[in-house]
């Protein structure tokens, strides 16, 4: 089963005389439990693709199906998009974007409370997740007390807290050194493989590509899947 089906996504910015085709007929299917890297030079359309699949900026045309539900058809989106997004899609950015005055565990907890979970259940799952991601001893620290790698682990915990079917990460290791970056990439693979989540990671970091099941490349708005012989062998 596919967690994500993006079919023939095209995005045109601007109008007649200032038209920019940022993405043309981009198609990507991500299975449950598959972790995908999306590579490509700056300006090639990666963010345009990710924000379309994340149901943030609609494409000009094309279809997006998440967990079997057609949620975006051209510029027309499913009516309850916002709550659908909150339940089904976890985002991770270059910087962890943690709330600075909340402790690590509270940052994770609040994502679940905003989704209607009780404080008690949210706290217990937050602690469980921190344990799973190897940062349990940091529960009561403010984000400013944590290293970049630890902050990203908390951001991953927050992103998976509501058990989304999809995780989208935009340059999540850009601020980390090679070793920490690799550990964060390995977490995405762990989450995908163990929880059945479909994961797309936009990255410039070529050092950890062996972590991924599938590699896509974008150039000038065109997307292609890297041929299988250059993909990781299972
Ligand atoms: P990447 O993420 O690979 O750097 P983007 O998706 O950000 O690429 O950009 C793809 C193309 O679309 C670029 O030519 C960029 O200048 C253009 N673009 C992106 N966002 C906008 C926008 N809001 N308005 C106009 N052009 C845009
Ligand atoms: P699809 O076109 O639906 O992605 P594929 O058969 O191309 O189906 O791939 C299914 C999954 O198995 C993908 O995640 C792909 O990366 C992986 N896969 C299949 N064959 C290989 C291979 N020879 N080496 C590495 N990965 C493979």
Image (spheres, grey):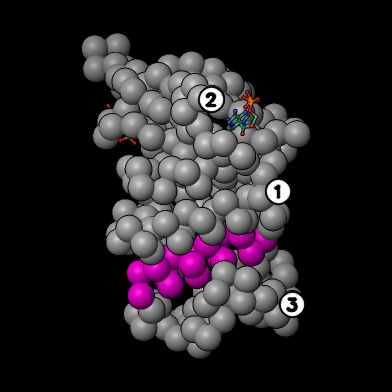
Label 2 vs label 1, nearer the camera: 2
Q: CA distance from mark 2 to mark 1?
A: 22 Å
Report the residue that reaches farthest toward the left.
17
Q: Nearer the viewer, residue 78 or 5?
A: 5
Q: Nearer the viewer, residue 232 or 53?
A: 232
Secondary structure of residue under mark 1: loop
Is the shortest distance between ligand 2 and the CB of mark 2 under 8 Å? yes
Above/below status of 18 relative to 192? above
Q: Earlier in the sequence, mark 3 or mark 2?
A: 3
Residue under label 3: 121
Q: Is residue 154 magenta?
A: yes
Label 3 vs label 1, nearer the camera: 1
Q: Quadrant of residue 220?
A: top left
Secondary structure of residue under mark 3: helix
Q: Quadrant of the N terminus?
A: top right
Above/below status of 37 relative to 178? above
Above/below status of 227 relative to 58? above
Q: Residue at x 54, y 59 (%)?
A: 187
Magenta stretch?
147-162
Secondary structure of residue under mark 2: helix
Q: CA distance from mark 3 to mark 2?
A: 43 Å
Residue under label 2: 228
Q: Position of residue 154 (x, y in %)?
A: 50, 70
Q: Quadrant of the C terminus?
A: top right
Q: Quadrant of residue 8?
A: top right
Residue under label 1: 196
Q: Residue at x 70, y 54 (%)?
A: 195
Would you say the residues marked 2 and 1 are in contact, meaning their CB atoms lie under 8 Å apart? no
Total marks drawn? 3
User: Main structural element of the magenta stretch: helix, strand or loop?
Assistant: helix
Q: Residue at x 69, y 41 (%)?
A: 32
Q: Position of residue 202 (x, y in %)?
A: 42, 42
């Amino acid at each position: 089963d596919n967690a994500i089906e993006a079919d023939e996504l095209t995005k045109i910015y601007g109008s007649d005389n200032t038209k920019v085709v940022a993405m043309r007929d981009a198609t990507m299917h991500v299975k449950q439990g598959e972790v995908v890297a999306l590579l490509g030079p700056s300006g090639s359309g990666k963010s345009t693709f990710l924000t379309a699949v994340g149901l943030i900026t609609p494409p000009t045309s094309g279809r997006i199906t998440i967990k079997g539900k057609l949620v975006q058809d051209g510029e027309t989106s499913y009516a309850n998009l916002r709550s659908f997004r909150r339940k089904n899609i976890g985002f991770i950015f270059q910087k962890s974007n943690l709330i600075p005055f909340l402790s690590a565990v509270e940052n994770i907890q609040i994502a679940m409370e905003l989704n209607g979970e009780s404080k008690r259940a949210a706290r217990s799952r937050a602690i469980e997740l921190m344990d799973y991601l190897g940062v349990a001893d940091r529960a009561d620290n403010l984000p400013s007390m944590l290293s970049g790698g630890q902050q990203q682990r908390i951001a991953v915990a927050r992103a998976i807290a509501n058990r989304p079917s999809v995780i989208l990460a935009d340059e999540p290791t850009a601020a980390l050194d090679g070793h920490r970056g690799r550990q964060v990439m390995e977490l995405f693979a762990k989450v995908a493989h163990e929880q059945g989540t479909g994961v797309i990671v936009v990255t410039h970091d070529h050092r950890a590509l062996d972590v991924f099941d599938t590699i896509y490349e974008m150039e000038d708005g065109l997307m292609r899947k890297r041929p299988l012989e250059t993909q990781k062998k299972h």
